């Protein structure tokens, strides 16, 4: 038995992810748009300076450091320096309501909050609701900026980073030490806290690279890539890819605040080749006027958070984006699967829409009643359950929700899907979003994917509404493209549905008979379609 006292013991700590780039790619660039451009060697020095500055202000092992920032070099540095101190990084969801943000600050037991000047008006609403004593550190893009607010800051990021050069030594400690925490955007009650240890984050990082690296097709992640996230860094560690990109030692680009024109400019100017986002952001990019003049042919785009509609995938492919699907949850760190394309399938849109094959070390099943595993026949649908080394062990301070999450010793995703003989998962719906009509299950995701490919449809959501005869019936909420005629869209949907029924791809019972055209479709704080809100609004 290898003990922690043995010289052979090597704890899986986040600081271990830095060794490879410092040895193999020390001069590779890290870019923070309009703010900083430096190398991995500089990054290492800046982490030590930041850790030294935080330590001078009393932050150490077990303390909680919250961050409210855009996607900048500062956030990236906090991804490493805070947990490497033995402290806990709380990535605050800036899109929550003020009362919810205050709840997360108290629940996480934040000791200090690094807050960008842009969020100070929000904090004026939040802080009166916070019960614990919390210190604030100012983040600003312009060091000369002196924001007007009611807060006394203990220091600023710039002041900490202007401190003397240091040989700060990051300590060793137990790899099971909590590294990060953040909050799910739950549909009921207060947000729930998930937390991850150093060991879990390192293993998730290695799982990503072991999954995305060795595949034969063009959507792989490799050392020639330039990485630019388009998933907010507060959302599940930007899906864990900043850690993976660091271990690879590849160029990284952080965009700051997301605007379509700026994102497209950075893709072109910095040569970004690998990114990830939710479908809403992809739609935003493709709809931007600048997209027509931007070469996107080198960009690989992983889509997660919600299903990738077929029409959106076709639009992305038409503009040259190598688009494909992945799957995971806040509770799974997050990545579990992605669409592993057969070399002969690269032109097949359907293959790109599959939820995909599990990463190495992921035990993923679909189950029915009594947790009985269902056949891998590509048809038997059940709840998706999973085990892996990096899953959320508990909802912090919420034993009841934890017990439900891990019922039967597998993590319950709340998603419905089926697995085929090749091991590929296809999510067919969220359990709470399945439309139950006349005793039959109607998949909202299948309807959305079908309708998204119809000419004139910019965006679509399928929900179930109460029906006296059938219990529920599907209703389509449609955002039309500018200039599109509603009658033409309805005709296109009817024709597409009839073709799908004739081909055996859609049940006749699933064809919706209600269409509602809307100006916009409600989204959650992380850009997913908010089905709960839509059902409440349109019932």
Image (cartoon, rainbow, N blue to C red):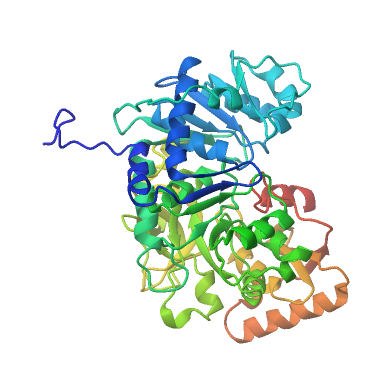
User: Residue 390 vs residue 492: left or right?
Assistant: left
Work out whether 167 lies above or below 334.
above
The image quarter containing residue 509 is bottom right
Q: Is residue 422 visible?
A: yes
User: What residue is rendered at 60% in x and 53% in y?
Assistant: 230
How many numbered discs?
0
User: What residue is rendered at 60% in x and 65% in y?
Assistant: 308
User: What residue is rendered at 37% in x and 61% in y?
Assistant: 211
Work out whether 396 lies above or below 471.
above
The image quarter containing residue 74 is top right
Q: Nearer the viewer, residue 361 or 431?
A: 361
Image quadrant where one finds the N terminus: top left
Q: Is residue 370 visible?
A: no
User: Residue 417 vs residue 429: left or right?
Assistant: left
Name the spot of residue 444 as percent of width and height, x first: 63, 63
Name the spot of residue 150 as percent of width and height, x first: 75, 16
Instruction: Name the residue furthest left.
Output: 1
Name the spot of residue 340 as percent of width and height, x first: 43, 69
Q: Nearer the viewer, residue 10 or 422?
A: 10
Q: Nearer the viewer, residue 29 or 196?
A: 29
Name the spot of residue 522 as percent of width and height, x first: 74, 51
Q: Nearer the viewer, residue 269 or 137?
A: 269
User: Residue 246 vs residue 35: left or right?
Assistant: left
Work out whether 161 lies above or below 42.
above
User: Residue 52 vs residue 484: left or right?
Assistant: left
């Amino acid at each position: 038995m290898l003990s922690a006292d043995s010289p052979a013991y090597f704890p899986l700590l986040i600081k271990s992810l830095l060794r490879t780039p410092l040895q193999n790619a020390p001069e590779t660039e890290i870019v923070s748009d309009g703010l900083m451009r430096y190398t991995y060697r500089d990054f290492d020095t800046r982490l030590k300076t930041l850790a030294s500055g935080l330590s001078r202000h009393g932050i150490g092992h077990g303390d909680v450091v919250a961050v409210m920032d855009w996607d900048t070099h500062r956030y990236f540095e906090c991804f490493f320096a805070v947990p490497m101190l033995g402290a806990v990084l709380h990535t605050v969801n800036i899109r929550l309501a003020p009362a919810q943000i205050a709840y997360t600050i108290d629940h996480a037991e934040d000791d200090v909050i690094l807050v960008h000047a842009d969020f100070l008006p929000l904090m004026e609403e939040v802080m009166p609701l916070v019960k614990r004593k919390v210190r604030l550190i100012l983040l600003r893009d312009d060091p000369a900026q002196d924001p007007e607010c009611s807060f006394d800051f203990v220091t600023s990021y710039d002041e900490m980073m202007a401190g003397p050069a240091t040989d700060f030594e990051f300590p060793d400690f137990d790899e099971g030490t909590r590294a990060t925490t953040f909050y799910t955007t739950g549909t009921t009650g207060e947000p729930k806290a998930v937390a991850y240890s150093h060991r879990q984050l390192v293993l998730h990082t290695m799982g990503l690279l072991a999954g995305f690296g060795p595949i034969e097709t063009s959507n792989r992640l490799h050392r020639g890539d330039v990485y630019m996230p388009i998933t907010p860094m507060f959302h599940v560690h930007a899906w864990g890819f900043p850690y993976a990109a660091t271990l690879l030692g590849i160029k990284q680009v952080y965009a700051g605040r997301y605007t379509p024109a700026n994102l497209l400019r950075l893709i072109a100017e910095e040569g970004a080749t690998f990114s990830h986002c939710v479908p809403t952001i992809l739609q935003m990019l493709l709809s931007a006027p600048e997209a027509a003049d931007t070469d996107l042919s080198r960009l690989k785009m992983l889509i997660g958070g919600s299903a990738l509609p077929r029409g959106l995938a076709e639009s992305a492919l038409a503009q040259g984006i190598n688009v494909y699907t992945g799957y995971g949850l806040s509770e799974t760190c997050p990545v579990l699967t992605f669409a592993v394309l057969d070399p002969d399938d690269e032109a097949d849109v359907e293959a790109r829409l599959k939820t995909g094959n599990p990463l190495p070390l992921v035990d993923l099943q679909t189950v029915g009643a009594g947790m009985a595993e269902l056949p891998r026949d590509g048809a038997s649908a059940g709840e998706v359950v999973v085990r892996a080394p990096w899953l959320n062990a508990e909802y912090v301070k919420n034993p009841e929700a934890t017990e439900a999450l891990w019922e039967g010793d597998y993590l319950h995703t709340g998603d419905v899907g089926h697995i085929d003989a090749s091991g590929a998962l296809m999510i067919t719906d969220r359990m709470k979003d399945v439309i139950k009509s006349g005793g039959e299950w109607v998949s909202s995701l299948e309807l959305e994917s079908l309708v998204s490919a119809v000419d004139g449809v910019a965006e679509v959501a399928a929900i179930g509404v109460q029906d006296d005869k059938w219990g529920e019936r599907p209703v389509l909420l449609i955002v039309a493209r500018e200039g599109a005629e509603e009658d033409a869209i309805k005709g296109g949907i009817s024709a597409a549905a009839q073709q799908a029924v004739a081909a055996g791809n859609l049940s006749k019972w699933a064809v919706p008979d209600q269409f509602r055209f809307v100006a916009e479709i409600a989204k959650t704080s992380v850009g997913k379609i908010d089905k709960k809100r839509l059902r409440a609004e349109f019932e």
